[in-house]
Amino acid sequence: MNIFVTRIIPQKGLDLLNAAGFEVTQYTEKKELSQEELISACKDSDALLSVGSNKIDEYFLQQCSHLKGIALMSVGYDNVDVEAATRYGVPVSNTPGVLSGATADVAFLLMLAVSRNAFYMHNSIGKGDWGFYEPTSNLGQELNGKTLGVLGLGRIGTELAQKCKAAYYMNVIYHNRNPNAEAEQTLAAQYVSFESLLKESDVLSVHVNLTAETKGLFDKSAFNQMKPSAIFINTARGAIHNENDLLEALENHIIWGAGLDVTNPEPMNRNHPLLSMPNVCVLPHIGSATVETRDNMAVMAAKNIIAVLQNQKMPQTINPEVYQN
Ligand code: NAP
């Protein structure tokens, strides 16, 4: 049995696949495979371990319907046509949970960094601009007792809310499609409408999945409803906010600041005006990038591949309907 792995992954995942007796081909070039290259690489493979944003769409699935399974090394699966995967009989798995703590840490880091203009202050020293001390200069905002609004109080959103409550006694409000009864009990989180979330949040952090419903949700009209003192954080997917509208909202002081781990497009252009704004902190999509988390993600993806190649269900299947066919 052959497994094609689209990028270099932690050795712990490869060791598991090798120990199970599978042959692994790992693509090691530092560039994205084109769809045709990926299809060609999968022709002689039994399973695919996919890292990054390769499109697993109708065309790919039609060409690669022989695959016994596809394991994503991510929790997000907006690059997958789930319905088509089920139709072609290909189980697809993701890596939920193991990256929640690390990603929530990045949202927390961005929230704190934006609240004190930290990245801009750091860069200004290198530019010889330490500045003359005045009690009215370089002022940030405190987070203590403020209201955290979470769009998407799922695994990562809940981890962030816990951290914000523990560190800063923040009140938590949230909006999902369905109320999260457990979080309401453990975090005293309050369910609100999307409009109320926009209006009431001091920090608004985005943790929804990218779908047709959430694409472009944070546009001019959304930013216009937020507080002038609000901080916008997005660690979910860049396409959930409109980057030009965000820039305009920041330039016109419609909102106070923004922290992004995800941009649209990625990578962000190095000359993007957001990168030189005092109240903006941007990171290059490093939410899950810790040694421990990446090891756990590789191990989880490998276990899903091993299961499917041993004719079992993948433990983290995103299209369980596929097993009913
Ligand atoms: P999750 O547990 O499924 O949480 C997603 C939450 O969003 C759920 O509470 C869901 O609740 C809510 N939601 C989904 N669609 C919605 C909609 N249309 N309107 C309102 N709420 C909606 O997922 P997770 O594990 O926390 O991951 C969330 C996302 O984070 C992933 O999809 C991925 O894109 C991103 N992520 C980024 C990084 C990074 O490196 N920056 C790392 C990991 C994950 P309902 O179903 O009740 O609506």
Image (cartoon, helix red, strand yellow):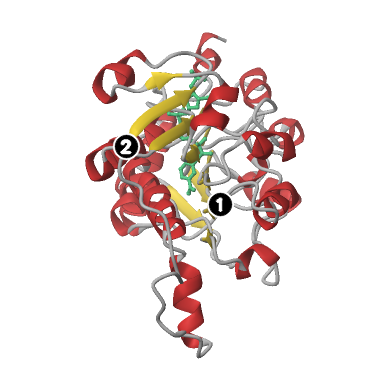
Local crowd size for mark 1, using a 10 Å CA cut-off: few (<14), some (14–19), many (≥20): many
Callout 2: SS: loop
Q: Residue at x 54, y 13 (%)?
A: 321
| Residue 90 on image: x %, y % | 58, 26
Residue 156, by quadrant, is top left
Local crowd size for mark 2, using a 10 Å CA cut-off: few (<14), some (14–19), many (≥20): many
| Residue 232 on image: x %, y % | 54, 45
Is residue 89 shown left or right of residue 243?
left
Q: Nearer the viewer, residue 165 or 269?
A: 165
Residue, far front: 135
Q: Residue at x 43, y 32 (%)?
A: 309
Question: Whole-Å distance between the Cαs marked 2 and 1?
Answer: 18 Å
The amino acid pointed to by label 1 is: Trp
Is residue 324 shown left or right of residue 166?
right
Q: Residue at x 73, y 52 (%)?
A: 248
Q: Nearer the viewer, residue 62 or 123?
A: 123
- Vertical side of 148 occupied by 234: above or below: below
- The image's mark for residue 170 is 2
Residue, far top: 324
Callout 1: SS: loop
Is residue 318 shown left or right of residue 103?
right
Residue, far bottom: 128
The amino acid pointed to by label 2 is: Met
| Residue 244 on image: x %, y % | 75, 51
Total residue callouts = 2
| Residue on which the image places disc 1 | 256
Q: Residue at x 61, y 34 (%)?
A: 210
Residue 56 in view, yes or no: no
- The image's mark for residue 226 is none
Residue 267, by quadrant, is bottom right
Instruction: Check if mark 2's residue and mark 1's residue have beta carbons within 8 Å.
Output: no
- Vertical side of 307 occupied by 87: above or below: above
